[in-house]
Image: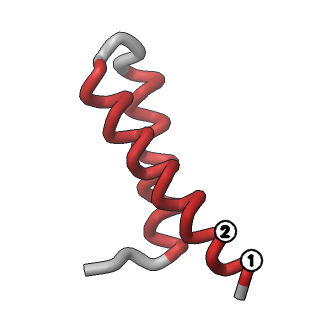
Amino acid sequence: MSQSTEELQHAMVEQLMAVIGAPDDQQVAEAADAVVRALDERLRAEAAA
């Protein structure tokens, strides 16, 4: 199921807070990276539309 832009924005905030809480955790960093990349892709697609 595809997430809405708003859901991705909320997920990004949650993931970045997790990174702040666990700055040395590679899995947390990778999860945050995936959300940021998905949001970036979504926002680029919306801007192009």
Q: Residue at x 42, y 51 (%)?
A: 35
Which residue is found at the position 71% from the left and 88% from the top?
49
Classed neighbour count for the residue bearing mark 1: other residues with Cα under 10 Å, few (<14), some (14–19), many (≥20):
few
Q: Which residue is mark 2?
A: 44
Q: Residue furthest top?
A: 24
Q: Is residue 25 above or below residue 41?
A: above
Q: Position of residue 31 (x, y in %)?
A: 32, 40
Question: Helix, strand, or loop for circle 1?
Answer: helix
Q: Which mark is residue 47?
A: 1
Q: Nearer the viewer, residue 2 or 18?
A: 2
Dot 1 amino acid type: Ala
Residue farthest toward the front in the current orientation of the protein = 48
Type of the residue with mark 2: Arg
Are dots 1 and 2 in contact, CB under 8 Å? yes
> What x and y, as percent, mark residue 2?
33, 78
Quadrant of the frame with the N terminus? bottom left
Q: Position of residue 8 (x, y in %)?
A: 46, 64
